[in-house]
Image: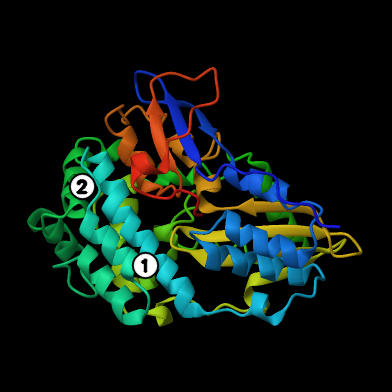
Amino acid sequence: MNRPAAPVALEPLLTLCHDAAGTVQDIRSTGVRESVARSLLGLDATTALEQLVQLLPLCGVAQRRAAALALTAGGAVLPEAQTAFDNESLWLEHVRACCWRHAIDWPAVLNERPDPALLRAGHAARDTASGSAALTALIEGLPDRATAEQLVRWAEDQGSAAARLLQRAFSIDRPVREDLRPSAARQVTTKVPLRRVDALREAAATTGARGLTRWPKRAGAAEVGARALLSRRTAGVLAELDASDWVLRLCAQVLQVSELRPGPAALPASSPATDAWTLPDRAGLGMALTARGPVFHRVVLDPASRVRDWEILAPTDWHFAVEGPVMVLSRSPALTVDLLPLLALSFDSCSAWRLAREPLAARPARIPASDTGREMAHA
């Protein structure tokens, strides 16, 4: 018999605890995805998938896609309605994520309030036309297929929060870029001991799955976000910029908007052949693409197709792991406490985050959604 899901806190919060120099000493998380995964144990596959979407609603299409692929690969038989996939809906989730990024996250680092017009555009995106219009509003004035020079000029000339923050990043970066070269990020590769990363890597390697070997593509092993998702041509634009890795990640978030603007066809095709893998002992691994990178679900079923184990790995779990990219890169002597918010922003957390001057002895209090202007339970 199915039991109701346990109450789950749907306001994930990351606290980056740092010293006076800006070096991150610890990263605390409310662990919402772990709580959601635990709440699904013992449920049958159909009910578990329904509850997952309710508990992680803001990236519901991507979460449902990855979870349905994992359950099916593990041997579950799901109703057709749960396995149907709409690429336009997934693309619209990318649109809304970009709108939240430009309307909330970037202004926050500039100590500004959210941009209500951009928020309304994101909420109003219901089809390809309105979604493309919302993306156009985010990068108004930036030419299609912009060159590196045009991107720099756009940051200098436009008045949006994204342009002003990018211009600030270029200015701050010049004195320190020799100590924050992209090669520094690639040194993080083996320093992420996050259990879910290791488990999913092992699962992928066991079956020859490429899910965790093809991500990231072109951004160094520390990054699975916007920079890893760019096309080869756009990645070449970044290569022409003389900037540190954290600045290139911010640039990638702007260029990603331009790449998504044409519509759902901008996303790679998804199918069980490329995004699902059957593992031993009635386990399955599924992947779906979010605007911040791939989200993975690994599910283990019992003979009655009830959930025995469930793990979720989102890009934020990867980037903000203890001893992960943000923590390790904060140790650079060139990265000051003033640069720390920009470093964190460049990794594009799906969770609301804050900085704390010293490690906290107690679990941090959650920030109410009303304080951030954004629901925070998306991956």
Question: In front: 183, or 131?
Answer: 131
Q: Which residue is mark 1?
A: 95
Displayed quadrant of residue 275: bottom right
Q: What secondary structure is marked by label 1?
A: helix
342 and 238: which is toward the camera: 342
Residue 136: image location, x then y, percent:
23, 71
Type of amino acid at the residue the image marks with label 2: Leu
Relative to 342, say whether 357 is above or below: above
Determine which quarter of the picture holds residue 240.
bottom left
Q: Earlier in the sequence, mark 1 or mark 2?
A: 1
Q: Nearer the viewer, mark 1 or mark 2?
A: 1
Report the amino acid beneath label 1. Val
Graded by Cα atoms within 10 Å as few (under 14), some (14 to 19) or many (20 or more), the crowding at tag 1 reads many
Q: Residue at x 15, y 65 (%)?
A: 150
Q: Which circle marks residue 165 in the picture? A: 2
* Label total for image: 2
Residue 134, image x and y in percent?
Answer: 27, 69
Residue 317 x/y as whole percent: 55, 46
